[in-house]
Image (cartoon, grey):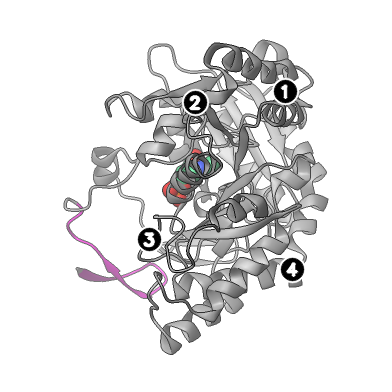
Amino acid sequence: MAVTATARGAIQRVPNDLEPYWMPFTANRQFKAHPRLLAGAKGLHYTTVEGREVLDGTAGLWCCNAGHGHPKIVAAIQAQAAEMDYAPAFQMGHPKAFELAARVAALAPGDLDRVFFANSGSEAVDTALKIALAYHRARGEAGRTRLIGRERGYHGVGFGGMSVGGIANNRRTFGPMLGGVDHLPQTYDRSKQAFSRGEPEWGAHLADELERLVALHDASTIAAVIVEPVACSAGVLIPPRGYLKRLREICSKYGILLIFDEVITGFGRLGTGFAAEYFDVQPDLITCAKGLTSGAVPMGATIVRKGIYDAFMTGPDHVIELFHGYTYSGHPLACAAGLAALDVYAEEGLFAKARDLGPYWADAVHALKGLPHVIDLRNLGLVAAIELEPIPGQPAKRAFDAFLRAYEQGLLVRTTGDIIALSPPLTITRALVDELFTKLAKVLKETP
Ligand code: PXG
């Protein structure tokens, strides 16, 4: 490590060899030639190692819903680290894990009130898929082994999540994956939905494709359907109005479990605790992560209906009911951060704040219509996508260029393909929404 003075005079440690770290989902060679290193974060802003301020348009990676460095969350983590670093997760427990499970259960809709802890969204998804399979088996329907995902779905990078996921780049280099998986069609059609404000009117009928898969495979072979209520990673694909309700109806008709992957939509992103509440659709399982601790400590969770948990609670008392779990399930630091994050969300009314800001956010998003390259704009809650016309023969180049320009101008955005995605901390103000979109408009005008 080399120690250098920044423009602000603060002493920062700057790694002087970027090679050993193989960065995730990153163009490593481009990054290492032109590093973008963050050194600090407070509220709505990052500070770079050079001392530049960057407005966080993405809540880190869709996770820091309470903003960065919230004093209450920081204090909770510090206190927990001093009090107890770790407690074994198997055959032992600690109070905060139970407390957090109860708080998450209370936030989840209906009888979704049993919570299994993991350390990431990917693990929460694999947990949900495994519980779905084991649940049917426990009920005497061991033939229900088929899992249904959706094209353009993202459910993390474990073999389970990747298999039900539907993003070609994330799948094609990793072999045959899980067997017995099928996919629903994705729900986006620009020719029918472009520039929809909120939920598009067209497309609910695509849920009926599940009927086709049931006819093909037979319901007795299908364990679960997993979808993101809003498919964020693939470019913010908003569900057509009525689509999720229809999916719920068909799953119920055939005894298929419905899993909502709420790793991004959970904890206020749409102005509600979960998207299930926003869409008034109750799934059988919810996966979550990210906002659960406001991104401060890694944690994921799988929330299941009480009846699913109960189906496992048979047999002799001393026998483990589910052979699954992680060393760090319910880690004390994560639980402390989660409890503090939930307190902050409640005390500061952040879900309601996000809901109230929604229309203003939508106006700001759709005001970009007509700017260079913009071929679609999508919004819901505090999420948005700006889809750009790709440069012929160079997919993803234009949006990546816009990302780099935005960063230079002090704005952090995410891109996937030629789509720019936005998901700021729920603490963003109208003034900062204005600043964000002013910067973005300038970037779009300057991007070739
Ligand atoms: N499910 C969903 C719906 C997600 O969005 C995962 C599972 C996996 O979570 P972990 O914690 O294992 O990464 C995710 C993660 C992006 C982006 O900008 C999205 C995610 C992660 C990083 C970047 O699209 N989503």
- Helix, strand or loop at label 2? It is loop
Q: Position of residue 406 (x, y in %)?
A: 50, 42
Q: Position of residue 186 (x, y in %)?
A: 58, 21
Q: Is residue 68 left or right of residue 266?
A: left
Q: Secondary structure at mark 4?
A: helix
Q: Which residue is mark 4?
A: 346
Residue at 27%, 26% in the rendered image:
173
Q: x, y (%) of residue 383?
A: 66, 42
Q: Tell me residue 316's x, y (percent).
A: 47, 64
Q: Nearer the viewer, mark 3 or mark 1?
A: 3
Q: CA distance from mark 4 to mark 3?
A: 29 Å
Write down the region rendered in magenta: 2-18
Q: Could you classify mark 2 by the number of other residues whose Cα lies within 10 Å: few (under 14), some (14-19), or many (20 or more)? A: many
**Tag 4: Cα neighbours inside 10 Å, few (<14), some, or many (≥20)?**
few
Q: Which of the two labelled residues, at mark 1 and mark 4, occupies the earlier sequence position? A: 1
Inspect the image, locate mark 3, and give the three-letter code of the amino acid beneath it.
Tyr
The residue tagged 1 is 195
Q: Secondary structure at mark 1?
A: loop
